Structure formats: C-alpha cells, structure tokens
C-alpha cells in the first residue's frame, strides 16, 4: 500500500484559505483517479476542509500554532520546515495504522500520475524512488512544460519506504509539536519538512533512490499560495488531454489557447520580433537576387 501524506498551511498564514481548499480538492481529485485502489491519503491541518473528502482520504486535525510570519503572511524557512515537518509527522503516525509499504509526501496543490500506486504495488520491496523528471504547470497561463531536476524544485517528488521515516513507537496523533520534533529528530528537517537535498541524505545513510521511470508528478505554480512564489515564465505548451488523462488536470474555465496564453507577453514579444527579423532578412535576400541594383 502507498500512503499519500500532505499538510495544510495554517489559516493565519494563508492569503486566501478558501483558495487553499480549492487547490487541495483538485489535488485529491488527481490522487483519486489512481488505476489501483491500494492507497490511503492523510491530510493534516488546523482546519478541516469544508468539502467532502474522497474515499480513502482521512483528515487529522492539529492545534499547532501558526509559524511566525516574516514576509507578508508567509513564514520564514525555519518556521515553514517546522510547521510542515511536524504535520507530516502526525500524518505518518496516522498512516501507521494502514501498514503502508511506501509513503509519498505531496504538496496540497500539485498533481500525481494515475499509475503511481499500481507501479509501487508491483515493486513493494524497492528502496524508493525519486521523481527527477516531471512537469510544471500554470493554470493562470493554461500551459505547462517539462521540468527536469524536478525533485530540486518540487516537494511532490519522493516515494520512500515507510520504515525510512523511523516513526517513533511511543507517539500518537495527539502528540504535541515539540514531541514530534524530538521524536523524529534529524529525519524531520531533512526529509519531512524539506526536500531539496533528500537524495544525498538518503544516500549517506545507505539508501539509493531510483529515478522513477516516467514523469510522475506535476508542480503547480502561479497559484497565489505557493510558499516558493514560483511562476512559469517563457514558452509553454497549452493545456492538452494528456494533463486530464494522466493527472486529472482540467483547463482554466473560459481559457482560450491563444499564443498569448501559451507563451506569455515577454516571450510573445521576443518571438514576434524574431519573426519580423526573419521576414525582413528573407525579403532582402530575395531582392538582392532579383534586382541588380540591390547588389551594388
């Protein structure tokens, strides 16, 4: 069994909490279209979602204080890692009752491939996988493109054996935040609350993660609630059926796949300028061939 675990931002650290819930609902819809039912989803947060959760999805409440805000409503890195890491710890404690072979920590606004659970089920004894190649998507622009080095950019990028998290036997889902910090020790800041250096962290402890053999997740940006604040500039592919079929991503309502929506204003200006230069150059070359005076 694969356990999907996520944490929700504290409402006091959210610019628009209904928006966070809307993003979560879309992510859960992505997980719910798995081609195998051998999974469980654990959502941990301070406020229970206002919508009905899908089958096999469980909400676990916590009363952790909001991390200190230093940049608008968003917490600094240490506060973010502690908040996310301790909530993921509660999620691992809750998942223990389901006896999962592997765990995938996911961000509550990303999307996952429909065949992840089926793949893990065939490889129960594997030491784990890293998604080093995925997709990055912006509904604001109604477009997407490939994202290599995915695990260095997005936290929805690791499928790890449950035992690797060293879940403390003496703790339950009613544990305090400090008890979670103390109980998980170095595991919490390195692979529960953060993700960028997880491959090396596991390797240093004898666990070599295998790259997932397909693009298994989509990093959703331009949401207004990304802790990283990352956007999607440059040229992108407009939304297509692949996103719906593999990841349950629906296009932005009312969006038209125009050149503007596909590439953005800066890239549009650059591509238009390049096109004009090519036309002028071509006209000049033709004139030189046809008109003797043009060669003088």
Image: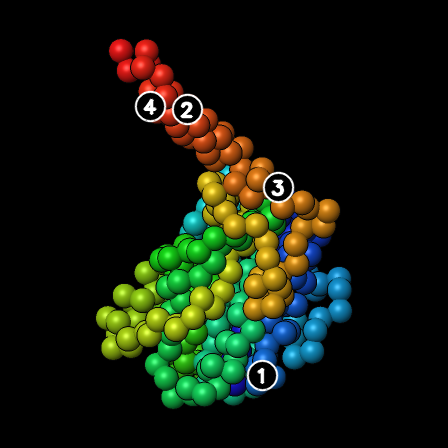
For residue 233, say whether it is visible. Answer: yes
Residue in front for this viewpoint, 34 or 4? 34
- Residue 289 image label: 4
What colour scheme does the image use?
rainbow
Tell me whether circle 2 and circle 3 mark residues in contact (CB < 8 Å): no
Residue 104 pos. (x, y %): 48, 72
User: Residue 72 appears in which quarter of the rendering?
Assistant: top right
Residue in front for this viewpoint, 187 or 68? 187
Residue 150 pos. (x, y %): 40, 59
Q: Is residue 93 above or below residue 16?
A: below
- Disc 3: CA contacts within 10 A as few (<14), some (14-19) or many (>=20): few
Residue 112 pos. (x, y %): 54, 67
Q: Earlier in the sequence, mark 4 or mark 1?
A: 1
Residue in front for this viewpoint, 284 or 97? 284
Q: Secondary structure at mark 1?
A: loop
**Which image quarter holds the C terminus?**
top left
Q: Which residue is mark 1?
A: 36
Residue at 36% over, 58% down: 149
**Rounded to the nearest whole Å, what is the CA distance between mark 4 and mark 3?**
37 Å
Residue at 40% over, 62% down: 133
Residue in front for this viewpoint, 148 or 199? 148
Q: Earlier in the sequence, mark 2 or mark 4?
A: 2
Q: Secondary structure at mark 2?
A: helix
Residue 194 pos. (x, y %): 41, 60
Q: Which residue is mark 3?
A: 258
**Rounded to the nearest whole Å, what is the CA distance between mark 3 and mark 1?**
36 Å
């Amino acid at each position: 069994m694969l356990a999907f675990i996520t944490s929700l931002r504290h409402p006091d650290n959210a610019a628009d909490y209904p928006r966070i819930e809307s993003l979560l609902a879309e992510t859960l819809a992505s997980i719910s279209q798995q081609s195998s039912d051998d999974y469980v989803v654990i959502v941990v947060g301070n406020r229970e979602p206002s919508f009905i959760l899908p089958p096999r999805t469980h909400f676990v409440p916590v009363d952790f204080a909001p991390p200190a805000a230093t940049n608008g409503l968003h917490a600094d890195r240490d506060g973010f890692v502690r908040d996310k890491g301790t909530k993921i710890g509660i999620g691992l404690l809750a998942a223990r009752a389901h006896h999962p072979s592997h765990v995938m920590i996911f961000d509550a606004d990303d999307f996952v491939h429909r065949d992840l659970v089926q793949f893990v089920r065939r490889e129960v004894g594997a030491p784990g996988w890293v998604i080093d190649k995925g997709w990055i998507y912006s509904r604001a622009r109604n477009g997407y493109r490939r994202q290599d080095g995915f695990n260095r950019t997005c936290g929805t990028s690791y499928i790890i054996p449950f035992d690797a998290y060293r879940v403390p036997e003496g703790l339950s889902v009613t544990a305090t935040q400090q008890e979670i910090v103390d109980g998980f020790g170095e595991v919490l800041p390195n692979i529960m609350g953060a993700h960028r250096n997880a491959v090396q962290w596991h390797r240093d402890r004898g666990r070599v993660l295998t790259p997932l053999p397909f693009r298994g997740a989509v990093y959703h940006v331009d949401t207004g609630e990304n802790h990283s604040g990352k956007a999607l500039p440059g040229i992108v592919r407009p939304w297509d059926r692949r996103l719906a079929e593999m990841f349950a991503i629906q296009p932005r309502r009312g969006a038209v796949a125009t050149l503007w929506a596909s590439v953005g204003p800066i890239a549009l200006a650059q591509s238009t300028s390049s096109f004009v230069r090519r036309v002028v150059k071509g006209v000049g070359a033709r004139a030189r061939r046809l008109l003797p005076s043009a060669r003088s």
